[in-house]
Amino acid sequence: MAPRPPAVATTRWWWVRHAPVAERVRPFIYGQEDVPAVFDDRAGLAALAAALPRGAVWVTSHLSRARDTARAIFAAGYPAAIPIEEPDLAEQHLGAWQGLSRAKFVGPEGEPAHPTWLVGAHVKPPGGESFEEVVARVAAAVDRLTAAHAGEDVVAVAHGGSIRAGLAHALAVPAERALAFQLENLSLTAIHHVRRADGSVNWRVVTVNRRPGGG
């Protein structure tokens, strides 16, 4: 068997899920509503600040809970950077369902209850987008940013939905399967994009849903 061509560029993605949203918001479906996060987990923020690579390119979604989480990590000890604001890394837009009670939510008629999310990946909320569409937009953004920052570290402060979408893209699995990933607030998911001398590309999933300093 011929040896594999050497890697010519490894772009390391460090996905961070934003800090928890305010307690009063949690019982509701918020999707792309711009709801506030809370930053009382000082140990978790400090652990992220220590664990993330220095000199990285920082990217956040346009939603304040992602942007403010990046600022909180800087305040906890990471050298301040100016993040790129990338709307395509935002959470799933849940349209008319945003603002509804999670406990009272009933999906569209004919759709079975979903074990890990509100609905299946193919279901599009009125005025919103399906998770399959989230995977497509996040994948396009990841490919674009990887090409622009080949060989660098990219810290992306984003959302549960967009990080699952990034995993679906890296693993080349159906969107429905990616909904099974559990991602805690302030968790770290690391994925490496490896481009080789013959032009081939592969992804390596290094860690998923890790809390630095907490095991």
Image (spheres, rainbow, N blue to C red):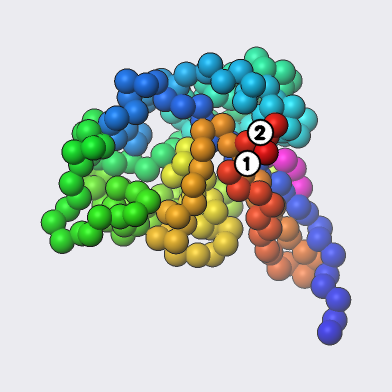
Residue closer to the observer: 18 or 192 = 18
Based on the picture, tell me whether residue 9 belongs to the magenta stretch: no
* Residues tagged 2 and 1 counted as in contact (Cβ below 8 A): no
Residue closer to the observer: 127 or 175 = 175
Based on the picture, tell me whether residue 152 belongs to the magenta stretch: yes
Q: Is residue 80 visible?
A: no
- The residue singled out by tag 1 in the image is 210
Residue at 77%, 70% (x, y): give it.
198
Q: Magenta stretch?
A: 150-154
Which quarter of the figure is the N terminus placed in?
Answer: bottom right
> Please, is residue 121 above or below residue 198 in the view?
above
Q: Which mark is residue 66?
A: none
Give the residue type at disc 2.
Gly
Q: Where's residue 56, x and y in %?
A: 72, 34
- The residue singled out by tag 2 in the image is 214
Q: Residue furthest left?
A: 109
Residue at 66%, 59% (x, y): give it.
203
- In the figure, residue 172 lies in which quadrant? bottom right
SS at badge 1: strand
Which quarter of the figure is the C terminus placed in?
Answer: top right
Residue at 73%, 32% (x, y): give it.
51
Give the residue type at disc 1.
Arg
Disc 1 crowd, CA 10 A, few/some/many (<14, 14-19, 20+): some
Residue at 35%, 34% (x, y): give it.
32
> Please, is residue 201 above or below residue 28 in the view?
below
How far apart, in angstroms, are the residues tagged by discs 2 and 1?
Answer: 8 Å
Q: Where's residue 200, x and y in %?
A: 71, 68
SS at badge 2: loop
Instruction: Count up the numbered dots.
Output: 2
Magenta segment, prevailing SS (helix, strand or loop) = loop
Q: Where's residue 94, x and y in %?
A: 29, 41
